[in-house]
Amino acid sequence: MPTTMQTSSPKLKFLKLAYQSVVNNVMALILTLGMVAVSMHLYRAGPEELLATVQSLNVSSVQVLTSTFMVVFVATVYLLSKPRTVYMVDYACFKPPFTFRVPFATFMEHSRLILKDNPKSVDFQMMILERSGLGEETCLPPAIQYIPPNPTMADARAEAEQVIFSAVDELLKKTGVSPKEIDILIVNCSLFSPTPSLSAMVVNKYKMRSNVKSFNLAGMGCSCSPISIDLARDLLQTHPNSNALVISTEIITPNYYQGKERAMLLPNCLFRMGCAAILLTNKRRLGFRSKYRLLHVVRTHRGSDDKSYRCVFEEEDRDGKVGISLSKELMRIAGDALKSNITTIGPLVLPASEQLLFLASLIGRKIINPKWKPYIPDFKQAFDHFCIHAGGRAVIDELQKSLDLSAEHVEASRMTLHRFGNTSSSSLWYELSYIEAKGRMRRGNRVWMIAFGSGFKCNSAVWACNRNISGRKDGPWADSIDRYPVHIPEIVKL
Amino acid sequence: MGFFILLCVAPLLYLLIGLWQWAFAGGDKSCYILDYECYKPKDDRKINTDFCGQIITRNKNLGLNEYKFLLKAIVNSGIGEETYGPRNVLMGREENPTLDDSLDEMDEFFHDSIEKLLKRSGVSPREIDVLVVNVSMLAVSPSLASRIIKHYKMREGIRSFNLTGMGCSASLISIDVVRNIFKANKNQHALVVTSESLSPNWYNGNDRSMILANCLFRSGGCAMLLTNKTSMRKKAMFRLNCLVRTHHGARDEAYGCCMQKDDAEGRLGFYLGKDLPKAATRSFVDNLTVLAPKILPVKEVLGFIVFRLIRQLNLGGSKKRGGAAGGGSDAAINFKTGVDHFCIHTGGKAVIDGIGTNLGLSEYDLEPARMTLHRFGNTSASSLWYVLSYMEATKRLKKGDRVLMISFGAGFKCNSCLWEVVRDLEGINVWKQFIDNYPLKKIVNPFLEKYGWINNEDESTFKIPDEHLPKI
C-alpha cells in the first residue's frame, strides 16, 4: 500500500500542525472573528443608541410568541428525528482457568503423538508456533487436550456453557442489570451452531423474559462482533428504553482439525478459547454511567470477488476431515478489504484537514499528474486507540504498515495475541480491556475496532469513551497486566 | 393573557409534532413483500412410500420395535407421495454425508429460487441492501450468506446476517431483522432466504425419540424480496402489520423438549421429547395473548375479557374447568374477526389439528396447511411460505385480506405475524403446475394402504414380512 507523506523536517511538521489547527477549527475561528467585530461595533455605538435601536424594532407580543414557537418547534423536530444514541454500559471477557493452558511444550508433545505418522506436518506446526506471536498462557478447552481429541456434542455444549456463562455472569454483576431487564439478545459464534441455538441456551440459563428478541448469528467468521453490534444498533433504534446483550465467542471443541493437511493445521496453532459479553443500551439513565458511546459501524463485504471468497474456507480434506484452509493471498486480500472499508469510514471520522488533503491529492491525481502517490489519510488524527483483530502476527504487521501506526498503537493487539491467542470475534474486546487495564483510556478518546473475517469481510466499529476509566483491577488482564508489554521476538526457538 | 396563550401553545405544539411524525417520519417505514419464490426441487428427488420403506429397512441399527414405531409414525403423518428428499439419502449415502453434499443441496436451492425471484421482480442483485439467510442446521465458514453474495456479485456495502439454530420458526425471525432495519433506514431492498439442511442431519441410530425427525422433514426453501421504498408500494404483494415473538427458553421443559444431541452410542440426532405438544400449546397461548389485542377489533377483545371475568366469577370455587387456557377458553375468542386466512406451520398432522381446535378453525381454513403437508412435507422454516402460495394459487387472496402466520421452533419459540394483502393476487407460483388437482377430495394415505397392517400387529408375534425386507 502507498505510504503517507514524509514529515521528517521540523519546519514541515510545524506547517502541518498550523494547517490542521486552522482547517479543523474553521467554524470556531469565523464565529470568534464575528463576535469580536460585533462587540467592537457595540462598544463604539454606546448604550443609548442600542436602546433606541431595540425600541424602534416595534415588535408585538404575538410576533415574539410566534418566533419562540417556531424555534421550539424546529428544535423539537430536530431532536426527535436524531437517531438514538447507543451506549455500551460495560463488557466482560472470559478469563480461562489456569488449568486449560497450552504452553508450547504441551502443544508440540500432543502434536508429535497425534501426528506421529506425519513428521512433516509436525515440523510445520512447530514452525508456525515459533513465528506465531502467541505466548505460553493461551488456553484450549479440555476436550481438545485429549490425545487424540474426541469431541462430542456434549463437550462442545459444555465449553459453550462455560465460556458464555462466565462472561455473562461477570457482566451482569458489574453492571447491576438483572437478566429480566434484557430486551434484546444477540449471540454470534461462527462454527458451532446447535439446535436450539446458543441464544436459546442463554435465555434458558438466565430465565429471560418471554418477549426477549433473540438472534443467533453463525458462520460469519472473526469479524462477527461488529456485525452483532450493527444489528443491536438498529434494534435499539426501533425499541425505545431497551437493553441489548451481545455475546461474541468461538467454540473450539468441534472445530479442531484432526487431519494432516498442512494448510488446514494452521488454525489449530492459532485459535484459542475466548468469549466476550457486551451490554448495550439506549436508556439515558444507564447512558450516564456507560463506558462508551457507539459512533459508527461500517461493514464491507468482498464476497463478489472469487479469490476473496475462497481465502478463508471450510472444506474437507482428502480423508474427509473438515478443517479451515487459509489461502496464501490472505494478506493481500485483507489489505484490499481494509482499503474499501477506509474509503467508507474515512469521510465519517476524519477531521476536515485530512479530508481536504485527500481531496486535493485525488483531484491532483486525476487532473494534474496521475503519477502522484495517493494520499493515505492519517488515521491517528481521528483515533486515539486502535483495536485490530488479533488474527495473527502477519495481519497486525500488515495493518501497522498500511495505517502507519506506531508500536504503541498496535501494542494492545500484539499483547492480546500473546496472552490469549486468536480468540476470533472476541479478540477485539480483550484488546480494549488491555488498553483500559493500562489506564490509557480517557474521556473523549475514540477507539477504532477493525475485524476481518471469512467471506471476505472487513468490519469496523468506532466508539467514543464516555467517562474516565481507571486502570482496571478486574477483567481478564487483572493478574498479568503488570508483566506487559513484553517483547515478542521474531522467532521463538522451540 | 400571555400565560393563557402559552397554555394553548403547548398542546398545539404536541399536535403538530404528532402530525409531522405521522406524515413524514412514519410514512416510508412499512415493510412490504415485493415477491417471493418457493423452491420446487427436481422431480428425481421425490421420495415415495416404497422408497421410505426401503430407507428404513436398510438402516441396520433398527430393530423390530423401531421399525414398527417408524411405520406407525409415517402412517399417521399426513405426508403424501411426492415430497422431496436430499440427494445423498436418495443415493444411499445417508450414513456418510460430506460437506460438499450439504453445500450442493444449498446451491441447488439458491441457484434456482433466487435466480427466478430476481428475474421476475426486475431487481438487480446490486440493489439489495440487506441479506438475511436462515438455515437452522448448517453453519459453514464462509457463511451461506457470503456464498450467495459471491454467486450474485452483490455490493460491498451489503449488510448480511446469517441466522442458524433457530428452528422452524426462523423465517419470521429473519422478517423481524428486516423489519427493524427498515424502521431505522429508508429506501432499502432486502432479500430473505430460508431453508433447511437435511443432507448432514440424517439420524443413523435407533433412539426412538430421534428417528422421528427423519420421517417428517423434507427438502424445501423460499426466497423473499422485501422493501420499504414508498415508490414500490403499489407493486407489492403483502404489507406487514405486526409481528409477535414469544420465547419460552426460560422454562427447562420447553428448552429441552427438542434438542440436537448425541444418542447413547455417540450418534448425533435431533431429539423430540414427549413434552413437545405441551410446550407448543403453552407458548402458543402466550403468543396469542400478546397478539390478540394487536390484530383483533377492540369489541372482540373486550368481549372476551368480559366473558372470562364472568366465567371466573360464576365458577368461583370449581377448579375443574379452570386449568390451562387451551381448548375451551380460546374457542370463545373468535380470531376470524381480525384474520381472514391462517398460515399454519406444517409441523405435522397433530400440529395442524391442535391449532385448528385451539382457534376453532374449519376444514376450509386448515386446507392450505393440510395440502402443503401432503405435497411438500414438513420443510421446516419455509413451510409457511408454501402454505401462503397455496392460498394464492387457489385464488383465495384478495386485496385487503389479512393473513396470520403461526410457527413454532426449538427453544421453545412461537412466532406469529399478520400480513395484509395489498393487491389481488393471481397465483403464478410453485403450485401452478398441479393446483388443479387440489384440494384433494380424499387424502388417500399411501402409507396407510401399504403399511396400515402395522396398526393391527401384535407386538409379540411381529416379524418384518419378507416383501418388506431389503432386496440384496
Image (spheres, coloured by chain):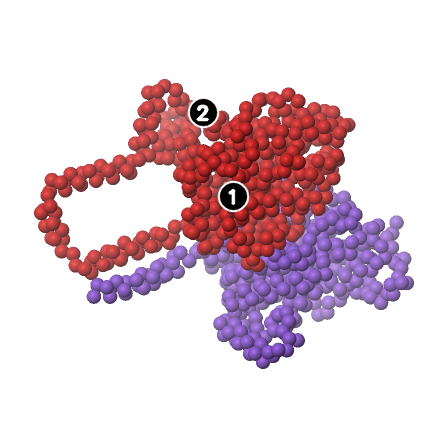
Chain colours: A red, B purple
**Which chain does the numbered disc 1 sit on?**
A
Residue at 57 percent across and 47 percent down: it is A169
Q: Which residue is mark 2?
A: A3
Of the pair B406 and B106, the residue shown nearer to us: B406
| Horizontal arrangement in the rendering, residue A491 relative to residue A290 (left or right) | right
Indicate the position of residue A350 as horizontal and vertical percent values. 40, 35
Q: Which residue type carries mark 2?
A: Thr
Indicate the position of residue A194 as horizontal and vertical percent values. 66, 48
Residue at 38 percent across and 25 percent down: it is A369
Q: Quadrant of residue B316?
A: bottom right
Of the pair A234 and B364, the residue shown nearer to us: A234
Would you call the spot at circle 2 few (<14 residues within 10 Å), some (14-19), or many (20 or more)? some
Q: Which residue type carries mark 1?
A: Tyr
Of the pair B62 and B157, the residue shown nearer to us: B62
**Which chain does the numbered disc 2 sit on?**
A
Asked if A482 appears above or below B204 in the picture, the reply is above
Asked if B22 appears above or below A313 in the picture, the reply is below
Of the pair B357 and B189, the residue shown nearer to us: B357
Residue at 31 percent across and 54 percent down: it is A74
The answer to whether one can see residue A88 in this image is yes
| Among the two numbered marks 1 and 2 on one chain, the one whose residue lies closer to the N terminus | 2
Same-subunit check for callouts 1 and 2 = yes
Q: Which residue is mark 1?
A: A91
Q: Quadrant of residue A374?
A: top left
- Quarter that holds the C terminus of chain A: top right
Direction top: furthest residue: A9
Indicate the position of residue A324 as horizontal and vertical percent values. 65, 36
Query: Which element is circle 1 on?
Result: strand
Would you call the spot at circle 1 few (<14 residues within 10 Å), some (14-19), or many (20 or more)? many
Q: Which mark is residue B11?
A: none
Query: Which element is circle 2 on?
Result: loop
